[in-house]
Image (cartoon, helix red, strand yellow):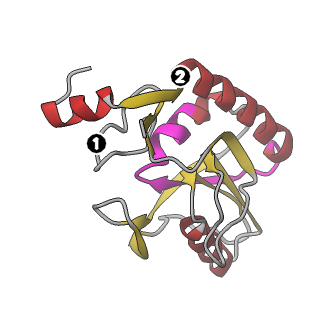
Amino acid sequence: MQLSKRFQEVYEKSTCIYSKAEVEAALDKMAGEMSARLGNSDPVFLCVLLGGIVPLGNLLPRLDFQLEINYIHVSSYGVKNEVGDLHWKAEPTIDLFGRTVVVVDDILDTGTTLRAAIEYCKMKNAKEVYTAVLLDKRKPRRPGGVEEADFKALTIDDLFVFGYGLDYSEYLRNLPGIYALKP
């Protein structure tokens, strides 16, 4: 992969904790669970931008039921990757009233972003709301945050990770696996 000197150094100081093949196998398993549980519900999958793009894009062809996709853009991270206040940038462009909604994000970390998305969907009178994440970070959640996703592909320790949709300073989302900085 072509990287600037800055990101080449980051890449060289990182360890691949899940390969592309491991991520894809986990997505296959998660898709099977989703198909069994959601197959007859005509759900709306809401992609949490930006991190949810790659996980959702790779999940969609694995799902064997009718669904609709849309997006929300909400983030609890700032430019320096520090958790802060939530920033709403875009709401869904479709009506969620009476719908089954699946909120898809890259990672369950503090739980605040998913909690905000769930509350938004409930406020818009969604019939039921599920959450799906590529990664579930094993760590205590913030008070009021989502404790557990309904669907999760993989779990990780409390590490700073990037790749497969997760960013390092807004870059490296397109790495084919999940990487962590070496301690």
Do residues under tags 1 and 2 come within 8 Å of each other at their CB atoms? no
Residue 49 image point, x, y percent: 43, 55
Q: Residue at x 72, y 64 (%)?
A: 147
Residue nearest the observer in this picture, 46 or 143: 143
> The magenta stretch spans which residues?
39-58
Say whether disc 1 or disc 2 marks the residue closer to the N-terminus: 2
Q: 137 or 55, which lies in front? A: 137
Q: Is residue 29 left or right of residue 54?
A: right
Give the residue drawn at x 68%, y 29%. Answer: 26
Q: Is residue 81 above or below residue 145?
A: above
Amino acid beneath label 2: Ser
Q: Name the image quarter holding residue 15.
A: top left
Viewer-proximal residue among 5 and 72: 5
Quadrant placement of the C terminus: top left
Amino acid type at image mark 1: Tyr
Q: Position of residue 169 (x, y in %)?
A: 28, 50
Q: Look at the image and tell me in which quarter the N terminus lies.
A: top left
Residue 60's quadrant in the figure?
Answer: top right
Task: Say whether residue 36 is magenta.
Answer: no
Looking at the rendered structure, the secondary structure element under dot 1 is loop
Few, some or many C-alpha atoms within 10 Å of disc 2 (few <14, some 14-19, many ≥20)? some
Circle 1 Cα neighbour tier, 10 Å, few/some/many (<14 / 14–19 / ≥20):
some
> Real-space Cα distance between discs 1 and 2?
18 Å
Tell me the residue at 56%/50% (across/down). Answer: 158
Q: Residue furthest front?
A: 183
Q: Which label was assigned to residue 19?
A: 2
**Residue annotated with mark 1:** 171
- In the image, residue 118 sits, relative to residue 151, either above or below, namely below
Q: Nearer the viewer, residue 87 or 93?
A: 87
Q: Position of residue 79 (x, y in %)?
A: 28, 61
